[in-house]
Image (cartoon, rainbow, N blue to C red):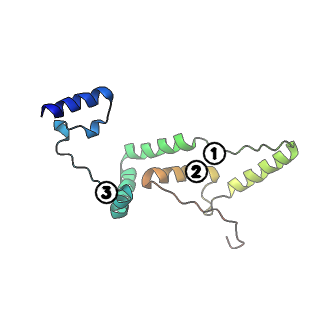
Amino acid sequence: MAFEAFRQRLGSIIGGFDAAQAHRRLRGFRASRAHVNTLIAASGETITARARWLVRNNGYAANAVESFASNVVGDGIKPSSTIADAAKKEELQALWLAWTDDADAEGLTDFYGLQRRAAREVFLSGEVFIRIRPRRAED
């Protein structure tokens, strides 16, 4: 008992993690030792559904998602060409701007809106999958 108290004091002096301590308030805390991927595979769908429900029904949660997306994306990730020829640089910029307007296959937003959408999805579910492909005539 005295050794345990000494070890706790020593740990607080030289550093360490509070979560590893044996405080009274942590006595009933039984953390899972399972890997995070195992936990997500078992209950990820439920957690994601609850997170989405919370964002729809709680203003604080919705604001947290929007704040995250705004801080990650800001005005949008905008490339800057290093081409020395001004005419080619301007032509490339015009092509980029034309593509960004049509980047969304659903036609609901532009490239910068897709970035915000991706950031929101990362916040809610922890992942996002983006597929970029050439447009087909039937699109």
Q: Nearer the viewer, mark 3 or mark 2?
A: 3
119 with respect to 42 (left or right): right
Q: Do tag 1 and tag 2 residues touch (Cβ < 8 Å)?
A: yes
Name the image quarter holding residue 21: top left
Taking the spot 13% from the left edge, 31% from the top edge, the residue there is 2
Q: What x and y, as percent, mark residue 48?
A: 38, 58
Taking the spot 43% from the left edge, 43% from the top edge, the residue there is 64
At label 2, the amino acid type is Gln
Q: Is residue 95 above or below residue 80?
A: below
First-in-chain label (1 vs 2): 1
In this figure, which residue is indicated by the disc labeled 3?
A: 34
Q: Is residue 90 above or below residue 133?
A: above
Answer few, some or many: residues within 10 Å of disc 1's Cα (few below 14, many 20 plus, some between 14 and 19).
Answer: few
In this figure, which residue is indicated by the disc labeled 2?
A: 115
Quadrant showing the C terminus: bottom right
At label 3, the amino acid type is Ala
104 with respect to 93 (left or right): left
Q: What x and y, as percent, mark residue 90?
A: 82, 46
In this figure, which residue is indicated by the disc labeled 1?
A: 77
Real-space Cα separation, disc 3 to disc 2, in angstroms: 33 Å
Q: Do tag 3 and tag 1 residues touch (Cβ < 8 Å)?
A: no
Taking the spot 69% from the left edge, 53% from the top edge, the residue there is 100
2 with respect to 80 (left or right): left
